[in-house]
């Protein structure tokens, strides 16, 4: 069966994770978010989680072999799905090569598209710099979505915190990685005319609508 593989790119704070989730619900494709998978491992305090934390806490990439392991595991677990949405993977040339090789080997027929949710650095910094998280999973923003009571979660009433990789130094590091390692990957899809660009500085629902329109035009969804 022909698999559709959509790789969503966007800097931190672009909302690509939200868009990946909305699209996964609409299409029933499997969303694979490496950031979420690592955070799950961290919560479980697994060996992998402990190893990943060393890199995540300073905004660096987790080594490629560890990242590949977690991706392969979750693709294999969902091999029957008609499509996959990758959020946060690949992030460098080695990871792109690993992914292409994996799909060539396991799924002989696949159509791989990339979707860029474009957001300027200034906007990324503003969105992430104001983010407050709760250990229950809720996420707030001091301007766009403030909690009712200062720094207290509306849902579970616990104290909100700034995620360790949302601190200013880690934000700069993550933006640098995006520009220097991730953006050059776009060339792979640009050459093949398979790069879809979406304006990420719009309301969430409008971004989702734009994505759906583009995917329909390409006959990737009904
Ligand atoms: P994210 O939520 O996608 O911004 O990911 C959070 C952190 O997880 C990143 O800053 C990296 O430390 C790690 N991470 C996520 N995806 C990858 C990846 N593809 N390769 C290496 N590290 C990753």
Image (cartoon, rainbow, N blue to C red):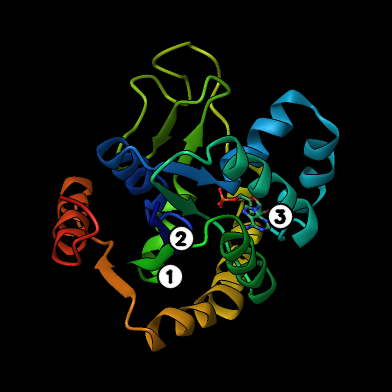
Q: Secondary structure at mark 3?
A: helix
Q: Are marks 1 and 2 in contact (CB under 8 Å)?
A: yes
Which mark, by number, is residue 125?
2
Instruction: Name the mark nearer the viewer: 1 or 3.
Output: 3
Q: Secondary structure at mark 1?
A: helix
Which mark, by number, is residue 121?
1
For the residue pair 92 and 105, the one nearer the viewer reads as 105
Q: Residue at x 43, y 62 (%)?
A: 110
**Which is more N-terminal, label 3 or label 1?**
3
Reading the image, the residue beneath label 3 is: 68
Q: Dot 3 surroundings within 10 Å: few (below 14), some, or many (20 or more)? A: some
Q: Residue at x 84, y 44 (%)?
A: 51
- Residue 118 visible? The answer is no
Q: Position of residue 221 (x, y in %)?
A: 21, 52
Q: CA distance from mark 1 to mark 2?
A: 6 Å
Q: CA distance from mark 1 to mark 3?
A: 28 Å
On whether ligand 1 comes within 8 Å of the CB at mark 3, the answer is no
For the residue pair 78 and 124, the one nearer the viewer reads as 78
Please say if 188 is above or below 38.
Answer: below
Q: Position of residue 146 (x, y in %)?
A: 34, 32
Asked if residue 144 lies left or right of residue 88, the reply is left
Q: Position of residue 85 (x, y in %)?
A: 43, 51
Question: Which quarter of the picture shows residue 113?
Answer: bottom left
């Amino acid at each position: 069966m022909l698999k559709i593989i959509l790789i969503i790119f966007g800097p931190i704070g672009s909302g690509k994770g939200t868009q990946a989730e909305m699209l996964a619900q609409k299409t029933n494709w499997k969303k694979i978010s490496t950031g979420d998978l690592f955070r799950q491992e961290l919560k479980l305090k697994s060996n992998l989680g402990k190893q990943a934390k060393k890199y995540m806490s300073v905004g660096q990439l987790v080594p490629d072999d560890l990242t590949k392991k977690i991706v392969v595991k979750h693709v294999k677990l969902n091999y029957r799905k008609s499509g996959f949405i990758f959020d946060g993977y690949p992030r460098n040339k080695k990871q792109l090569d690993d992914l292409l090789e994996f799909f060539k080997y396991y799924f002989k027929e696949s159509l791989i598209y990339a979707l860029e949710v474009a957001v300027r650095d200034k906007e990324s910094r503003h969105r992430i710099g104001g983010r407050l998280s709760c250990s229950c999973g809720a996420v707030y923003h001091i301007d766009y979505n403030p909690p009712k009571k200062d720094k207290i979660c509306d849902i579970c009433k616990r104290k909100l915190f700034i995620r360790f990789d949302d601190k200013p130094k880690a934000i700069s590091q993550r933006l640098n990685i995006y520009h220097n390692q991730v953006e050059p990957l776009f060339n792979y899809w640009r050459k093949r005319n398979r790069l879809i660009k979406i304006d990420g500085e719009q309301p969430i629902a409008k971004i989702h609508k734009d994505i759906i329109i583009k995917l329909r035009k390409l006959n990737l969804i009904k």
